[in-house]
Image (cartoon, rainbow, N blue to C red):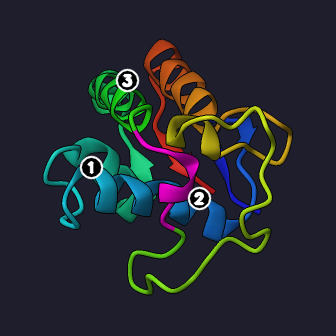
């Protein structure tokens, strides 16, 4: 199960396909299918699996913009797999009533919004000056 790690600090994410869905949703819905065209730092973090503490603050700015932009989409606009548009989440359309927009859709295994967990991890990376990794 993937997590975000800053040194010894670990932030639970959930399933690998779930994490992929978050970044694929950004790519398809906000970047017209061209990963990194609008959010290059976040895209680089996902594809490389690591982000330096020096760029974590920029990634936080990108993430804020992502959350604002995803708030304009319905949860049904989720992209589970950018390479296969027929793939759907394992739970189908059965989602919690608290998920009102696409910004709310991705919730971690321990019940937190994925974008909030990522923001916390990015903030930790900046504060302790250690890279953020997907582990």
How dense is the environment of label 2, judged by Cα within 10 Å: few (below 14), some, or many (20 and up)?
many
Side (left or right) of 42 relative to 31: right
| Sequence-wise first label, 1 or 3 | 1
Image coordinates of residue 128 in percent, x first then y, are 52, 17
Q: Which residue is mark 3?
A: 64
Disc 3 on helix, strand or loop? helix
Neighbourhood count class around disc 1 (C-alpha, 10 Å): few under 14, some 14–19, many 20 upward? some
Position of 27 relative to 42 (above/below): below
User: Where residue 102 sits: x, y (%)?
Assistant: 52, 43
Q: Is residue 53 above or below residue 16?
A: above
Q: Quadrant of residue 58?
A: top left
Which mark is drawn over residue 133? none
Q: In front here: 10 or 97?
A: 97
> Which label was assigned to residue 19?
2
Residue sitting at 30 percent across and 22 percent down? 61
Q: Label 1 vs label 2: CA separation?
A: 16 Å
- Residue drawn at (72%, 63%), measured in percent from left and top? 93
Mark 3, Cα crowd under 10 Å, few <14 / some 14-19 / many 20+, is few
Q: Nearer the viewer, mark 1 or mark 2?
A: 1
Tag 1 residue: 30
Q: Which residues are magenta?
A: 73-79
Mark 3 and mark 1 in contact (Cβ < 8 Å)?
A: no
Q: CA distance from mark 1 to mark 3?
A: 13 Å
Report helix, strand or loop for mark 1: helix
Mark 2 element type: helix
């Amino acid at each position: 199960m993937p997590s975000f790690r800053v040194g010894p600090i670990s932030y639970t994410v959930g399933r690998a396909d779930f994490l992929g869905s978050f970044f694929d949703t950004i790519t398809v819905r906000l970047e017209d299918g061209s990963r990194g065209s609008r959010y290059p730092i976040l895209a680089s973090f996902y594809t490389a699996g690591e982000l330096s503490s020096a760029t974590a603050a920029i990634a936080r700015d990108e993430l804020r913009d992502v959350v604002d932009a995803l708030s304009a989409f319905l949860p049904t606009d989720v992209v589970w797999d950018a390479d296969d548009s027929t793939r759907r989440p394992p739970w189908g359309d059965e989602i919690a009533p608290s998920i009102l927009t696409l910004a709310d859709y991705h919730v971690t295994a321990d019940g937190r919004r994925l974008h909030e967990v990522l923001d916390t991890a990015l903030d930790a990376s900046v504060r302790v000056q250690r890279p953020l990794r997907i582990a």
